[in-house]
Every structure is written in C-alpha cells, then in structure tokens.
Image (cartoon, rainbow, N blue to C red):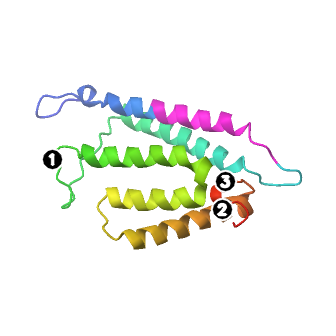
Amino acid sequence: MSRPDGETQAEQVDRAQYGLAAVLALVGLYTIIDARGLNVGFGDPIGPRVFPYVIGSLMVVLAVLLAVATARGDLPQAEEGEDVDLTSPPDWLTVAKLVAILVLNLLLVNLLGWAVTGGLLFAGCAWALGSRTLLRDLVVGVVLAVGSWYFFYVGLGVPLAPGVLDGIL
C-alpha cells in the first residue's frame, strides 16, 4: 500500500514496538515462572500466586496484542497535550533523582521496613517530580505504605519487611 508521500506501509513499521513487545512478554513469562516458587499456605484457596499469574498473563497477552498491532502497521501517535512540550529534551536530573530514590529504597527496605521506606519513597518521588509540600507528602506516603503493608500482610498473607516497626505493626 503506497501513500501520497511515497512511503509504503512496510516502511512505517516501528521496530521498537517489537522490542517492547518482546520485553513485555519476557517480563510476563518471568513473572509467571517466578510465581511458581511462592509458598501457598494450607487451606488458602487463593494464595499469593494468583496476582503474579494474572499480571504475568496480562503482560503476555498485551505483548501479543502489541506485536499484532505493530504487524498491522499501527503506529503510536505523539501526545499533543498542551502541558507536554515534545521539543524539549528529557529532564535527566529528575530521572536521576527518581532512580536514586528507588535505589535508596531497595537498600533500606530490609533495615527500616516497608512502612518507613514506602513513605519515604512516596515523599521522595513527589519531591523529585516537583511537589514542595513535604509534610503532606510524608503523611500521604506513610498512610499508603502502612495501608499497603496491612493489605499484603493481612489480606494476602504476604509478609513485607516490618523493619524497625517490628512488633508495632
């Protein structure tokens, strides 16, 4: 199929989408395979394996759909939102701040526990993305971290690291 500007449809295939589909499929398969190693409690009808199976399966399905869409010639459309300047370069300082906060969270989560590091993670990411209300960000982060800690521990039976709050939570 030719277009008025002389490009054929085969020339417009975005090969990066195939790469993204491959990475998505690999991560989905890894999630499914890795979930097989989770311990299932006796008499627990759902267990901790269900969510990784669902998420991994959805990732594989999305990878297949992306590959099919790419093969059909679908191209992503650039966002034309009024608050996004597509001509400006990436803000690598913000990316570096977010990466540093994530690495710090990985290093401290076993020592301080999820409730503390989750709150710091949320507040740090909000700060890196431009928020200047540190106290509110910390309170929201702690509420979300403690809530997610109880959700995993009580609701799913998956213990997250309590850290310094062991015995308090």
In the image, 8 versus 12, the foreground residue is: 12
In the image, residue 161 lies at what x, y percent? 66, 52
86 is higher (above) or lower (below) than 21: below
x and y, in percent, of residue 158 in the image? 72, 53
- Residue of label 2: 165
Q: Which mark is residue 160?
A: 3
At 59% across and 56% down in the image, what residue appears? 114
Q: Does the magenta stretch include residue 61?
A: no
Write down the region rendered in magenta: 22-40
Q: Determine the secondary structure under disc 1.
A: loop
Which amino acid is tagged 1? Ser
Asked whether disc 2 touches disc 1, contact meaning CB atoms under 8 Å apart, the reply is no
Q: Residues within 10 Å of mark 2 (few under 14, many from 20)?
A: few
Which circle, 3 or 1, is nearer the viewer?
A: 3
Residue at x 66%, y 44% (from the top left corner) = 53
Answer with the quarter of the image where residue 52 lies: top right
Label 1, on which residue? 88
Name the foreground residue: 69 vs 21: 21
Q: Name the kind of residue labelled 3 in the image.
A: Leu
Please say if the residues under marks 3 and 2 sit with CB atoms less than 8 Å apart. no
Residue 117, position as x, y percentages in the image: 53, 56
Query: Which sits earlier in the primary sequence, circle 3 or circle 2?
Result: 3
